[in-house]
Amino acid sequence: MFIHPEEIMETIHMISSMNLDIRTVTMGINLRDCVHPDIETFNDNIHEKMTRCASKLVDVADEVEQMYGIPIINKRISVTPIATIAETYTQEEIVSIAKTLDRAANEIGVDFIGGFTALVHKGMTAGDRRLINAIPEALAVTEKVCSSVNVATTKAGINMNAVKLMGKVIKETADLTRDREGIGCAKLVVFANAPEDNPFMAGAFHGVGEADCVINVGVSGPGVVNSAIRDLNNPDLGEIAECIKKTAFKITRMGEMTGREVSRRLEADFGVVDLSLAPTPEVGDSVAAILEAMGLESCGTHGTTAALALLNDAVKKGGAMASSSVGGLSGAFIPVSEDAGMIEAVKRGSLKLDKLEAMTSVCSVGLDMIAVPGDTPSSTISAIMADEMAVGMINRKTTAVRIITAPGKKTGDMVEYGGLLGSCPVMPVHKFSSEEFVKKAGRIPAPIQALTN
């Protein structure tokens, strides 16, 4: 890949002044060849393969960071969805697998490991159910393990049995980690149309269609886009879209360059660049700030969904021009706790849960890092998930829910996690019950949009 010197100088400016970084370099590792009927041997096989494949991941990422001068914030691992290879094990044995993943992640030195995952969009096997029931304990006794469950697709519809179960799992996860403000919920995401090559947590897993060992890169850059828009002189919306496209092009080029170099040094396949705009709690490094730079007084007011649609589309167009390897989620993230502008919008009352749901119809993921009162019923959590799964199913897109039922907290309180997870105000939910709807369970059929063959 040829990089013009002018691009290098622009990148240096973006890094030094606009919070530009590589959010994550994630190594995907296939664990299907680790399967063994004996759980101890299986765990030993997992540990051996992970430490063998990823032993140099952190060092190589650090070397490439120094070589290019581009900060790489997180180094992560994703693995084969555990439910697909742990069908015969007991719930206790499945928890032991989570402990093995965590031990290997700590030895390797990565920040998180994803793949404690079940894919149950059409139905659940006995093994799937055992893994899902093991999630609360697994997330409580590990530090770096992240979990995801895919409960809906456009082709299959919504598995409401799984949605109902996940409401209870989220409540139990919050309760088992109540001494840390329910942090287990921050490591658990429920998906519709989950991609197999997503480098971002908590939803990363190594899909069955992937090679044995793959490097996927997640870039970031809300601060860069925000600065670029604010530098324009009284632009119209078309000019703003063009500016975002050009900026996303530069960000994506940087991400692919980094990912390919890491892959080459590790002798792994290069997978994708996920060009999602992933915010941080740093002031200015915010998707909400971008929307406000377009002319909105506060994120969440009328016009916010249209502004987000413009942003997401322009990011995808710019990234697609820069790389033929764009994948993962790729768009704009709106995680409340991880975006200083979103937090302020919630505090001032312009951004509420219903508006966030509307915004997810046009952004790249869903209701992300939302905190709700600790006494919220599990049926309400399931109903929130069902709404979001419907958005993804009907619109043929990835959506997700990462929701925290904050133990002991009420509306207006703050939940504090620090680091990239940030902090978030506890948001109100509707007082009216969804209990009877959720209890009906079953499956919401696939929409007519699924009939594409």
Image (cartoon, rainbow, N blue to C red):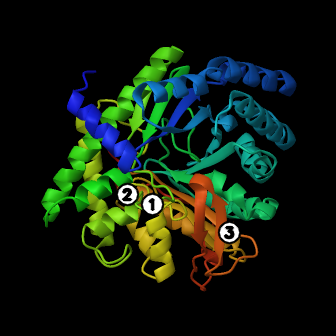
Q: Gap between marks 1 and 3, in whole Å?
A: 18 Å
Query: Which residue, given by chain and number where applicable, does mark 3 sit on?
Result: 405
Query: Tags 1 and 2 in contact by the CB under 8 Å rule?
Result: yes
Residue 268 appears in the figure: yes
Q: Earlier in the sequence, mark 1 or mark 2?
A: 1
Which residue is more in the foreground, 35 or 183?
183
Which residue is more in the foreground, 339 or 40?
339
> Is 261 placed left or right of 200 in the picture?
left
Q: Earlier in the sequence, mark 1 or mark 3?
A: 1
Q: Position of residue 50 (x, y in %)?
A: 68, 23
10 Å neighbourhood of mark 2: few (<14), some, or many (≥20)? many
> Is 442 placed left or right of 225 in the picture?
right
Query: Which residue, given by chain and number where applicable, does mark 2 sit on?
Result: 363
Instruction: Report the residue at 43% width, 27% height from top.
Output: 259
User: Residue farthest to the bottom?
Assistant: 431
Query: Tags 2 and 3 in contact by the CB under 8 Å rule?
Result: no
Query: Which residue, given by chain and number where applicable, does mark 1 sit on?
Result: 334
Q: Amino acid at mark 2?
A: Cys
Disc 1, SS: loop
The answer to whether 23 is drawn above or below residue 67 in the figure is below
> Is 35 placed left or right of 421 in the picture?
right
Q: Quadrant location of residue 114?
A: top right
Q: Position of residue 224 (x, y in %)?
A: 33, 51
10 Å neighbourhood of mark 3: few (<14), some, or many (≥20)? many
Q: Amino acid at mark 3?
A: Thr
